[in-house]
Amino acid sequence: MREGASPGRVSGLVLNLFFEHSTRTRVSFEVASKRLGLDVVNFDLAASSIAKGETLADTVRTLDAMSPAIVVVRHSRCGVPEEVAHHTQASVVNAGDGTRAHPTQALLDALTLCDAFQVNRVEELAGKTVSVIGDIAHSRVVRSNLEVWRRAGIRVRLVGPRAFVPSGFTELGYEVHHDLARGLDDADVVYALRVQTERQSGCLYPSAHEYFRRFGLTRERLDRFAPHAVVMHPGPVNRNVELESSLMNDDRSLIDRQVANGIWVRMAVLRMLIDARKGLV
Ligand code: CP
């Protein structure tokens, strides 16, 4: 898609069904749909009949009667994409469900890593080290990325306060650090995660200020512990909580590239689904 091979225009309706806030994912699915020639409708949750008590199942059945080819769904509850799939003939794309998965984020991150290290396939990144810092407990982004990174042979370190890195990850064989300097040590990639207060129950950390003091990625810490690393973040960033604000514009930051790559990856996903529906692949 990105290299200009004509994707060919296709037809069909894409329904963006977002039950949670989103900027990057929703807009990039919309842009990707339009670039492919697809019609796209952004479901307006606040103006919908869900406010009058219509159930998720009935909402999806109603929308299915309008014959969408693809439904892109985001929801705060794990498993909703599968539920949606039970009530529609459309292909369903998971745009993030609860703490479980965010598959297209992992794909765009893989593409961004390939760009950064100038390789064509993610398997060529085997042996690189990614240090993930932050709220791993509540991150669907990290769960999807772990699937990709494991398959690619990328070494992963999970870094954060104990409340953010459940002990289950150690049992699964992941390298876990509660000390930032050790977690960063000469990493190739530092992947900072958003502190997801909306998914946390109770107070897991004393304050944003205290989190930044111990685990915030600053230019000084990056220069000292992982000077050659590139910096990634799925967004939205809490400036001066996960990252020192000025790092967003640092040459080592891939954050804008991640967003740009989201369009190509989502075009590819949508195109594959449309072709599959026509029995072409
Ligand atoms: N990365 C990501 O999912 O961002 P949005 O919540 O803005 O879509």
Image (tube, rainbow, N blue to C red):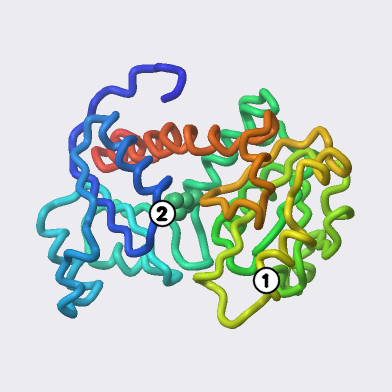
* Residue displayed at 55% across by 32% down: 257
- Do the numbered discs 1 and 2 sit on residues whose CB atoms are within 8 Å? no
Q: Quadrant of the N terminus?
A: top left
Figure check: 265 above or below 148? above
For this rendering, which residue is in front, 48 or 175?
48
Amino acid type, residue under disc 1 in the picture: Ser
On the image, the x and y values in percent for residue 153 come to 74, 44
* Residue displayed at 18% across by 80% down: 53
Residue beneath disc 1: 207
On the image, the x and y values in percent for residue 178 come to 83, 65
On the image, the x and y values in percent for residue 233 come to 60, 47
Furthest residue toward left: 65
Q: Quadrant of residue 47?
A: bottom left
| Left or right side of 104 for 158 | right
Figure check: 210 above or below 223? below
| Left or right side of 257 for 214 | right
Please rate how many residues cluster around mark 2, counting C-alpha atoms within 10 Å: few if below 14, some from 14 to 19, many from 20.
many
How many marks do you count on the picture?
A: 2
The secondary element bearing badge 2 is classed as strand
Identify the mark at residue 95; answer none if there is no mark: 2
Amino acid type, residue under disc 2 in the picture: Ala
Q: Is mark 2 within 8 Å of ligand 1?
A: yes
The secondary element bearing badge 1 is classed as loop
